[in-house]
Image: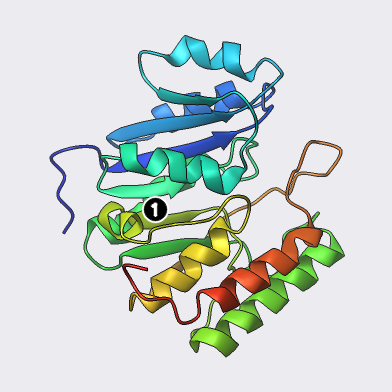
């Protein structure tokens, strides 16, 4: 069982130019039936995101970068400040509904898992996901099985929850979207079993501001390979 003297979960929200959704994301996370610590990393936004976040200064820790540094860098910047029993990443664009967070962290709080991923593919591919993205996600799943001998249906999901002391042991090096394969590889190298739970997911289009592309896939495959033989402390 997790130590619940402090927050049950630290929710990390990397945000870059998300003025249309950031307020709703923050409001919905703060309304969760949990003891929540929220850290938003404003990663060099040039729209109204920065001003909107000022409204939450008394309830949310906001870290601000003057220039975009990348999703991985933003997450690494926030992890040392996390004091919750668990850590989960919430994207700022509402492709993932924050109300799913309690179910994802529950197995960790109950001592049944140390790492939980929310899988988008429990019932097939979600409507609206582009064909190249579907292919890349299948290839990532096969790569994980080939390299780590574990079945994982959704390596690239945003919803990755960890026991906080575990993710702090990973010595993360990611800068952009390779956060996902790095924590996947290091979880397995630390001997963890990744539990997957089904989630709902509403894909956002490139026109709507989606930042990750199927062309980011080579970095993901390389990162999985690079950390195949990683050892804690390196």
Q: Which element type, helix, strand or loop, lies under badge 1?
A: helix
Where residue 8 sits in the image (x, y, percent)?
Answer: 26, 43
- Residue 197 visible? The answer is no
Relative side of 7 to 189, left or right: left
Residue 62 sits in which quadrant? top left
Which residue is rendered at x = 73% and y = 65% of the image?
217
Q: Report the coloring of the rendering.
A: rainbow
**Residue marked by disc 1:** 103
Which residue is rendered at x = 78% and y = 57% of the image?
127
Q: Is residue 166 above or below residue 16?
A: below
Q: In the rendered image, which quarter contains the C terminus?
A: bottom left
Relative side of 187 to 44, left or right: left
How many marks the image carries: the answer is: 1
In this view, the residue farthest toward the front is: 234
Residue 107 sits in which quadrant? bottom left
Seen from the viewer's position, the closer of residues 23 and 198 is 23
Q: Is residue 117 above or below residue 141?
A: above
Where residue 158 sits in the image (x, y, percent)?
Answer: 56, 53
Q: In the rendered image, which quarter contains the N terminus?
A: bottom left
Q: Bin the neighbour count of mark 1 within 10 Å (Cα to Cα): few under 14, some 14-19, many 20 and up.
A: some
Seen from the viewer's position, the closer of residues 88 and 119 is 88
Which residue is rendered at x = 52% and y = 24% of the image?
64
Where residue 97 sits in the image (x, y, percent)?
Answer: 56, 42
- Residue 149 visible? The answer is yes
Where residue 43 sits in the image (x, y, percent)?
Answer: 59, 31
Relative side of 4 to 109, left or right: left
Q: Is residue 43 above or below residue 110?
A: above
Seen from the viewer's position, the closer of residues 201 and 44 is 44
Residue 9 sits in which quadrant? top left
């Amino acid at each position: 069982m997790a130590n619940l003297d402090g927050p049950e979960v630290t929710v990390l929200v990397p945000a870059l130019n998300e003025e249309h959704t950031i307020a709703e994301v923050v409001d919905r996370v703060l309304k969760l039936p949990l003891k929540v610590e929220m850290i938003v990393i404003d990663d060099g936004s040039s729209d109204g995101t920065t001003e909107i976040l000022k409204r939450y200064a008394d309830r949310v820790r906001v870290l601000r970068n003057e220039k975009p540094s990348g999703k991985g860098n933003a997450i690494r910047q926030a992890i040392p400040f996390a004091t919750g029993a668990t850590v989960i990443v919430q994207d700022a664009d509402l492709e993932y509904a924050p109300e799913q967070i309690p179910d994802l962290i529950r197995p960790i709080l109950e001592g049944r898992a140390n790492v939980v991923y929310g899988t988008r593919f429990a019932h097939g591919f979600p409507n609206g996901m582009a064909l190249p993205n579907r292919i890349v996600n299948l290839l990532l799943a096969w790569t994980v099985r080939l390299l780590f001998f574990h079945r994982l249906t959704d390596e690239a999901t945003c919803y990755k929850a960890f026991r906080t002391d575990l993710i702090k042991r990973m010595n993360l090096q990611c800068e952009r979207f390779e956060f996902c394969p790095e924590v996947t590889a290091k979880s397995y190298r630390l001997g963890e079993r990744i539990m997957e739970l089904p989630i709902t997911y509403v894909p956002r289009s490139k026109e709507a501001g989606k930042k990750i592309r199927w062309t980011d896939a080579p970095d993901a495959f390389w990162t999985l390979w690079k950390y195949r033989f990683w050892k804690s402390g390196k």
